[in-house]
């Protein structure tokens, strides 16, 4: 992107400072620097007179004649340094005046406490490690432009250190999930991201072309069909934690590239998965948040203490739309839904209207953890039918804060029923059937339970964030056209 006039002016001044530092003998982009520890570690082990070496980004400078106070910041803490002309020497002290906010430096010296009680480092030597050619976001107000925060996350992390809380929590959640599942005997696997057919869910895939094979390929929308092949092959407990891709819209709870966990357990069922996800999510809350009560600071708190509510899909619909809902005609259901401002085309069936009512009017009101069970079979073609009603499937959708967090199934292992239901979903297009998966089922897959958790949404629940973009370091953004009159970042 072309720089604005203001940005060019700032950059030229910093290039001039760079030349000054080079003339003073500084290498502008240094090599490795041996640190005593991170700034947080140095603070934790603080002792008067202790010699240390520290490094970080200069984020504040206060000149006081023959002495200068500055603050270094790294990924762990911010720490004050003190440079005195008499102790440092005239040339190194003068050269420090060419240091700009944002530059990385390394320092060595001794720890001491100022008269105001601040732990500090008296610098005996310093060296330039990396020169910043652009000014940092304005100090006191931080980086407020949401779009810039997402596009230039590195500036967001510099200007708003509190956002690290979310991403540190995300890292700890992922670590907990792996340890939790491995401790229960689950085996982590990796399955293809590039697939000849996009299966395992109903979604629009990203399409690409595999030059070496001379054939079109799809980015996976879910790893389910490959993980089930592993059940056929003899793995009893498997999970995969990775990226899925769906070529669909972006909003506060959807991103086309997202992280998901899928878990399968042979000889289990939907109830096995309900217990597993309760223990996993509540365990993550306790370890990462230190409490079962999570959510936004100024909103409704979510109580993740098990057991969670369990309610059948049809019962929820009756609660909200009337006990006679499933006895109503299509016309009556359509009129009821339209009266509540739902977009209901005349071609919609009763089942489709019902799910629109659930999706738009019911699900978003389920704030506390709720297992919605026994969904219509046409909505979940990969799940086993309920033994008492073949029109329903033995599944749950875990809903928290008005959004689906985790679906779980008693997995369909009947290859004949599976073929019929996938063919129905494909509208009779045989080319959309994954014949290798169906062949695998015909070799025999044990009864099993399976579930998938949207990791981005889980992080939103546990951290209280309202937008999926706030829990993804680099969310998808439309390419921005050059803006020559953009204001400078400071």
Image (spheres, helix red, strand yellow):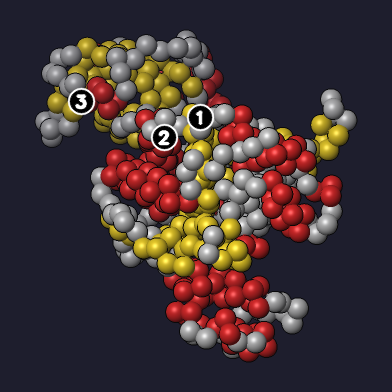
Q: Secondary structure at mark 1?
A: strand
**Nearest-to-viewer mark from 3 and 1:** 1
* Residue hosting label 1: 188
* Residue hosting label 2: 181
- N-terminal-most mark, 3 or 1: 3
Mark identifier at residue 124: none
Q: Position of residue 466 (x, y in %)?
A: 45, 58
Give how far apart the Cα atoms at labels 3 and 2 are: 34 Å
The reply to whether discs 2 and 1 touch (Cβ–Cβ < 8 Å) is: yes
Above or below for 100 versus 463? above
Q: Position of residue 320 (x, y in %)?
A: 47, 80
**Nearest-to-viewer mark from 3 and 2:** 2
- N-terminal-most mark, 2 or 1: 2
Classed neighbour count for the residue bearing mark 2: other residues with Cα under 10 Å, few (<14), some (14–19), many (≥20) = some
Q: Nearer the viewer, residue 386 or 336?
A: 386
Mark identifier at residue 44: 3
Q: Secondary structure at mark 2?
A: helix
Classed neighbour count for the residue bearing mark 3: other residues with Cα under 10 Å, few (<14), some (14–19), many (≥20) = few
Measuring 51% from the left and 73% from the top, which residue is drawn there? Answer: 314
Q: Secondary structure at mark 3?
A: helix
Q: Toward which corner of the image does residue 126 lie, by quadrant?
A: top left
Give how far apart the Cα atoms at labels 2 and 1 are: 9 Å
Measuring 61% from the left and 49% from the top, which residue is drawn there? Answer: 412
């Amino acid at each position: 992107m072309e720089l604005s006039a203001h940005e060019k002016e700032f950059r030229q001044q910093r290039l001039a400072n760079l030349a000054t530092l080079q003339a003073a003998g500084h290498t502008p982009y240094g090599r490795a620097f041996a640190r005593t520890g991170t700034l947080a570690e140095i603070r934790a082990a603080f002792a008067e007179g202790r010699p240390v070496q520290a490094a970080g980004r200069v984020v504040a400078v206060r000149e006081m004649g023959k002495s200068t106070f500055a603050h270094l910041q790294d990924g762990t803490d911010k720490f004050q340094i003190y440079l005195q002309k008499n102790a440092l020497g005239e040339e190194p002290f003068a050269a420090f005046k060419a240091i700009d906010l944002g530059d990385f430096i390394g320092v060595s010296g001794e720890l001491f406490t100022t008269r105001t009680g601040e732990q500090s480092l008296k610098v005996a030597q310093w060296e330039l490690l990396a020169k910043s050619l652009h000014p940092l976001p304005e100090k006191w107000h931080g980086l407020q432009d949401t779009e810039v925060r997402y596009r230039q996350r590195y500036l967001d992390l510099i200007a708003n250190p509190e956002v690290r809380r979310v991403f540190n929590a995300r890292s700890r959640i992922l670590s907990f999930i792996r340890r939790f599942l491995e401790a229960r005997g689950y085996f982590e696997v990796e399955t293809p991201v590039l697939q000849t057919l996009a299966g395992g869910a109903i979604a629009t895939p990203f399409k690409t072309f595999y030059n070496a094979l001379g054939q079109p390929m799809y980015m996976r929308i879910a790893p389910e069909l490959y993980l089930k092949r592993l059940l056929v092959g003899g793995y009893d407990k498997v999970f995969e934690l990775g990226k899925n891709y769906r070529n669909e819209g972006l909003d506060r709870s959807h991103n086309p590239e997202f992280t998901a966990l899928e878990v399968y357990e042979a000889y289990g069922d939907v109830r096995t998965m309900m217990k597993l996800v309760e223990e996993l999510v509540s365990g993550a809350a306790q370890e990462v948040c230190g409490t079962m009560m999570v959510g936004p600071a100024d909103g409704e708190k979510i109580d993740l203490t098990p057991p969670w509510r369990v309610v059948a899909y049809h019962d929820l619909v009756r609660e909200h739309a009337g006990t006679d809902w499933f006895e109503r005609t299509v016309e009556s259901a359509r009129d009821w839904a339209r009266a509540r401002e739902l977009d209901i085309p005349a071609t919609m069936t009763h089942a489709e209207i019902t799910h629109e009512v659930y999706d738009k009017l019911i699900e978003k009101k389920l704030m506390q953890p709720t297992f919605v069970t026994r969904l219509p079979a046409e909505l979940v073609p990969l799940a086993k039918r309920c033994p008492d009603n073949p029109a329903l499937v033995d599944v749950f959708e875990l809903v928290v804060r008005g959004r689906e967090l985790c679906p779980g199934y008693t997995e369909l292992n009947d290859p004949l029923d599976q073929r019929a239901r996938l063919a129905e979903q494909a509208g009779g297009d045989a080319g959309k059937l994954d014949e290798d998966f169906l062949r695998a089922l015909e070799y025999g897959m044990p009864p099993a339970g399976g579930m998938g958790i949207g990791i981005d949404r889980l992080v939103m629940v546990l951290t209280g964030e309202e937008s999926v973009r706030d829990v993804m370091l680099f969310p998808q953004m439309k390419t921005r056209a050059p803006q020559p009159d953009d204001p400078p970042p400071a």
